Image (cartoon, grey):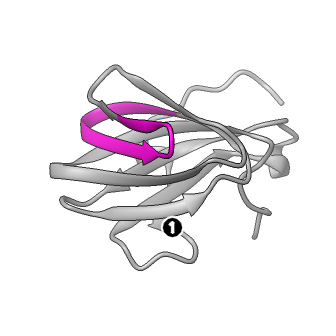
Amino acid sequence: MKLRRFTIADASLERSPGQEADVFVGNLVDERQGGPVSIGYGRYAPGQSLTETMEVDDVMIILEGHLSVSSDAGTVTAGPGEIVYMPNGETVTIRSHEEGALTAFVTYPHWRPAHD
């Protein structure tokens, strides 16, 4: 794998698998490029909610808007320039606020099998 730079324009955003919410994600790096992590962008429409049990360690960087992430450990709210860490095995609910949100993420290992 070589040195790369990405922007949101490079991502092909698709509805988050298995979810009905208006939450879209796009991998830019995953096992197809030989990387040990998945890297990409996520876009949350305003007022969306997504609950899942993490199957990977997920680092989410908020680029625009605000998100609240809740688990048994409590709730954190994050905005532009802030990072939320969601550990493997934790059940989380991610809620977007009235303006929606744009995020970047890094997961280890890959958050889903790559598809062509």
With respect to residue 106, does 89 lie above or below? below
Image vertical order of residue 54 relative to residue 34, above or below: below
x and y, in percent, of residue 6 in the image? 52, 33
| Magenta stretch: includes residue 71 | yes
Q: Which residue sits at x=19%, y=61%?
A: 47
- Comparing 5 with 31, the one in front is 31
Look at the image and tell me in which quarter the N terminus lies. Answer: top right
Identify the residue shown where x is 41% and y is 37%.
74
Q: Secondary structure at mark 1?
A: loop
Which quadrant: the C terminus? bottom right
46 relative position to 5: left or right: left
Q: Is residue 29 visible?
A: yes
* Horizontal and vertical percent position of residue 52: 56, 62
Residue assigned mark 1: 16
Give the residue drawn at x 88%, y 41%.
34
Task: Please tell me how crowded label 1 is: few (under 14), some (14-19), or many (20+) other residues with Cα within 10 Å.
Answer: some
Instruction: Please give left or right for residue 34 compared with residue 28 in the image.
Output: right
What is the residue that sits farthest to the right in this orientation? Answer: 34
Q: Nearer the viewer, residue 115 or 96?
A: 96
2 is within the stretch colored magenta: no
State which region is magenta.
Answer: 60-75
